Every structure is written in structure tokens, then in C-alpha cells.
Image (cartoon, helix red, strand yellow):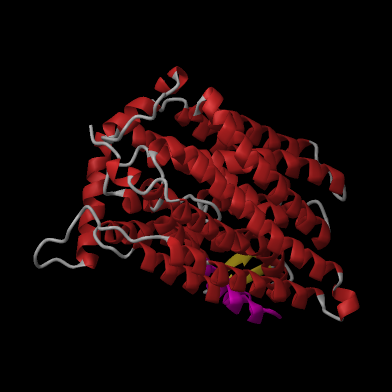
Amino acid sequence: MQSTAGSATTANNRREQIGWYFYDWANSAFSTTVVTVFLGPYLTAVANSAADSAGFVQIFGVAVRAGAFFPAVVSLSVALQALFLPILGAIADYSQLKRRLLGIFAYLGAFATMGLYFVQGSNFLLGGLLFLLANLSFGASIVFYNAFLPEIARVDERDRVSSQGWALGYLGGGLLLALNLVLFAGREALGVSDGLAVRISLVSAGLWWAIFTLIPLATLRQRQSIKQLHRGENYLTTGFRQLGHTLRQMPRYPHTLLFLVAYLLYNDGIQAVITLSAQFGSEELRLDQQILISTILLVQFVAFFGALFFGWLAQRIGVKQAIILSLIIWTGVIIATYALVQPEQPVQFYVLGAFIATVLGGSQALSRSLFSQMIPPGQEAEYFSLYEVSERGTSWLGPAIFALAYQFTGSYRISILSIIVLFVLGLAVLTRVNVRRAIAEAGNQLPDPVPNRENR
């Protein structure tokens, strides 16, 4: 069994860990201000202005409901990630380019986000293309960001480090969202239209992302890669070759593969709720933009404490059990949304937001730290590229289910209920994962101690 001595030598470097946290602070502005709050309702309104009398827009000759356009673009962006991110991850594992690639994709995404300022009138296709580029770049940057975790934290530190990163991200995303809420609330006094206020908010997210990315780029150290290119090879051809090798190799790590399948299912459900909640609140519950923003703001700050709480809880009942508990709560939230929440009742929306916030950070932070222990040494970026296909803000299956349900039923309420299948299936697969065996199969050091309940 291999040890994690390589990462242990830098695990106490608090400067690197704090710098790493700040990329969560930087990119969370895109997740909250763009994906979760503003762009869904705004791009839907732009698409509606271009729709025909039946509510359809034409996209290269295909009739699509205006309300299905945004989730369809989200789904397409992640389908593209499924093609490109594993290749990028393999390239990163064979090079010393993780930090550079993190910066390249962070700034590509940030500038595409700033470009959303120019989306207005009926040019919904421009908005879709810019969001496609921004979301694809967001996902790519997170691959390289996550791959630093095994290098900067020992095995027994990763739950804490991962949870603190998520917690700081909620604060960063929440702070910018609060500033945008002030702008939106005072738009009439400032003589700013609703559309212009949204577009300014979108630009602010891109600027925030670009400015605070400087911190991790300045503090993270690039280490020598474990793998080296063979004579006559280049990074691109090696990336394709290594991806094929990894996919053939994964059956050797059945419990890592099983966990990855579980995560792809339940986290797609989580991301669908995050991504589409503003659209659901606007279109189905008829809540105004200020209510939606304030709810997401509530989620951001409550989630800060939720992430820290679940990090603490994992030390008491085990990581797997803590994740299972969070998924049970998620399932209950979906059922309550479908059956109980009524239109024009903001208090009910706030209550649901509080429940979501409590489990949001914990379910994601603990999944990341647990998966980092199941990766064969030297293949961190490559495995995290597969993991990132369903990471926050990049879900594809959930939005696809939501979009199809709305396309055929015209009901947002049925569409949100349809997502529950992802939580149920993900939970069922997760119960089959043997955590201790997964870590041992990957050749990594077992955490000390591993709770007995984690052995199943």
C-alpha cells in the first residue's frame, strides 16, 4: 500500500491551504449570481421575447419551449465537459501545468461571464453561447482546483480542508450576491431598469471571479508530476491515451467506480435544484426577483455553517453516513416543494431554502474529500475530471430531465418532482460503497481511525 508522504510534506502549509480556499471564494460568484439567481430567469425572459405565439423559439430549425432553453444549455455545456475534461485531466497529471490551466480556464470563464452584459432584447442565442463557454470553463478550472487537495492536505485533514473551502465559497458568493441585492433593491432610485441591474450583476460576477483568482495563482505551488511523457509523445496524444487507459483500469477499483456513479446521480440532483430553483420560483411560484435573490442569499450564509457542521458530524458518525443523512433531507425537500409550496408564498420558499442550506455544503464538501482518498496516486486531475462532470453548476442529467418533463407536460411542478429519481438512485448506489475497501484498492493510506460504520 502506498503512503501519502508526498502530500504530507506540504500538508501543514497553511498559506497554500488558505490560497486554495480563495478559489472557492472567487468562483462561487459565478455559481450564485449567474447560475443560481440571475441568468436563468433573465435568459428565459429574453427567450420569451423571441418566442412565437405558442411559446417556442427556433434553434437551428428545432422548436424548443422558451422555458426549456436555459436548462437545455446547461445540459449541453456539461455534455461538452464530458468530452473535454477527462482529456484535460490526463494532460494535467502528465505535466506541471495544473496551476497554469487553472488560471487559463478561470479567466476564460470570467471574461465570458462579463460578456453576458451584452445579452438583451431577443438575442437569447448569444446568451446561450456565452453561458456555454463560461460554464465549460468553470468546470475545467474546478478539475485542476480539486486536484490540488491531495497535495496540500493529509488524509486526516481533508474533510476539514474541503469543508472550509466550501464554507468560504459560500461567504464569497453570498457577499457579492448581497451587494447585487442592494443594487437591485435600489434600482428605481438609481434610475436603473430591471434588465440593466441584472446585466450589471452578471458583470460583477465575472470581475469578482477574475480578481480573486489571483490569490490561489500566487500561493499554490506547482509540484513535479509523478508521471512523465515517453519519448516522442506530446500532451494531447498522451491525454487521449491515458483517458482510455483510465477507463479500462477503473474496474480494478470497483468501489471507487461505485462511489463515482452514486455521486454523479445524487449530485446531478443537487445541481439541478441549485441551477433551476430561481426559474422555478419565478415561473411557477410567481415570486419576484428580490425574493429569489434574498432566498439564495439566505442559503449562502446558512450553508457556511452547514458545511462546517457536516464536517464536524462526519468525525462523529462517519463520512458516508453523514452524506446519506444529507441525501435523505434533500429527498424530503423535493417532495415538500412539489406537494406543499404554494404560489406567492415567500415564507414557504425561505423555509425550503433554509433546509437546503443546511445540507448543501456538507453533501458536496464531504463527497469531494472522500473521493480524494479513493484516487490512485498520480492520477488526481484525471479522476477529478470524471468527478467534475457532475460537480456544482455543471449538472447535465438533472436539467435534461427537468427540461424534458417541462417540454412534454408544460408543468414546472412535475419537472421539479422528476428530479427526485436522481436522489433515490444515488442513495441506493451509495449504500453499496465499501469506503475502507475503496481506499485500500486505490493504494492509499487509510485514515486513522476509520469508523467501523465506514467499513461497509
Q: Position of residue 115 (x, y in %)?
A: 59, 79
Q: For residue 114: magenta? A: yes
Q: Position of residue 412 (x, y in %)?
A: 71, 50
User: In the shown orientation, is residue 48 left or right of residue 391?
Assistant: right
Task: Measuring from the top left, give residue 33's x and y in whole percent.
Answer: 67, 63
Residue 62 appears in the picture as rendered = no
Q: Which image quarter: residue 182?
A: bottom right
What residue span does the magenta drawing correspond to?
Answer: 112-134
In this view, the residue in front, 221 or 376, is 221
Q: Quadrant of the C terminus?
A: top left
Name the residue: 68% across, 32% down. 332
> Which residue is at 23% across, 42% downward?
249
Q: Closest to the observer: 105 or 87?
A: 105
Name above or below for residue 57 compared with residue 431. Answer: below
Instruction: Say if 41 sits above or below 359 in the image.
Output: below
Residue at 44%, 55% in the rendered image? 16
Q: Residue furthest left?
A: 231
Instruction: Please say whether residue 210 is one of the residues in the magenta stretch.
Output: no
> Is any part of residue 18 visible from this angle?
yes
